[in-house]
Amino acid sequence: MGTKDGAEFKHALRDIAQHAHTLDSAFDRVRCVEWARKLASLSDEDLEACKLKNEYAQLLRIQVRNNFLHGPFVSPPPDTSRLCTLSECLGNLMAKQIPYLPKVGPVSPILFHKSPDGRAYVSAKQIPSGGVFCYMAVSPDGLK
């Protein structure tokens, strides 16, 4: 794991640990610990695995700080040594809630760029049935 990715992941886990006890539900506290352990146990051998761990950790961190778990974190983490991408996971959760949406397969970006100063991010992904989904974020303080 790169130094920056490792530090970001450790910082997110520390923040999760500091706020997990404030979750109202004992069920949520258990799920939070299970997911934190799962993420910490995943391999950090390659850059993609590091990014994946960080994506899940950052989403869990946001949810714990807002005192509410939802999405993938209301269920136990999978027993496998690999997680699907966060976009695929969230897409499939939405497809379960909205029956007419198709199930999402692996999604790989056709464009992914973060500015050198960390203040802008853009990602574009191809939509299987045609078209492109674009996401752009800009922050004066930098994106973490």
Image (cartoon, rainbow, N blue to C red):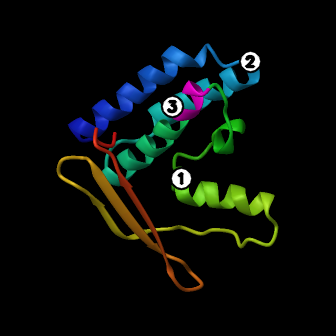
Residue 66 locus on image (x, y percent): 59, 28
Query: Residue 91: x percent and y percent?
Result: 63, 61
**Residue 76 seen in render:** no
Q: Secondary structure at mark 1?
A: helix
In the image, what residue occupies the spot 28% across and 43% down?
Answer: 140
Most extreme residue toward the bottom is 130
* Viewer-side residue, 40 vs 98: 98
Residue bearing the label numbered 3: 61
Check the picture and name the quadrant holding the N terminus. Answer: top left
Mark 3–mark 2 Cα distance, whole angstroms, equals 17 Å
**Mark drawn on residue 86:** 1
Please give the name of the residue rendered at 52% of the width and 33% of the height, measured from the top-left corner: 62
Q: Amino acid at mark 3?
A: Arg
Left or right: residue 55 versus residue 66 is left
Residue under label 2, please give it: 26
Contact between marks 2 and 1 (CB within 8 A): the answer is no
Report the side of 23 relative to 65 (left or right): right
Q: Callout 2 environment at 10 Å: few (<14), some (14 to 19), or many (20+)?
A: few
**Magenta-highlighted residues:** 61-66
Residue 18 at x, y = what percent? 49, 15
Q: Earlier in the sequence, mark 3 or mark 2?
A: 2
- Vertically, is 37 above or below 103? above
> Can you tell which mark lies on residue 141?
none
Q: Nearer the viewer, mark 3 or mark 2?
A: 3
Q: What distance separates the C-alpha of mark 2 from that of mark 1? A: 25 Å
N-term mark: 2 or 1: 2
Q: Secondary structure at mark 2?
A: helix
Q: CA distance from mark 1 to mark 3?
A: 14 Å
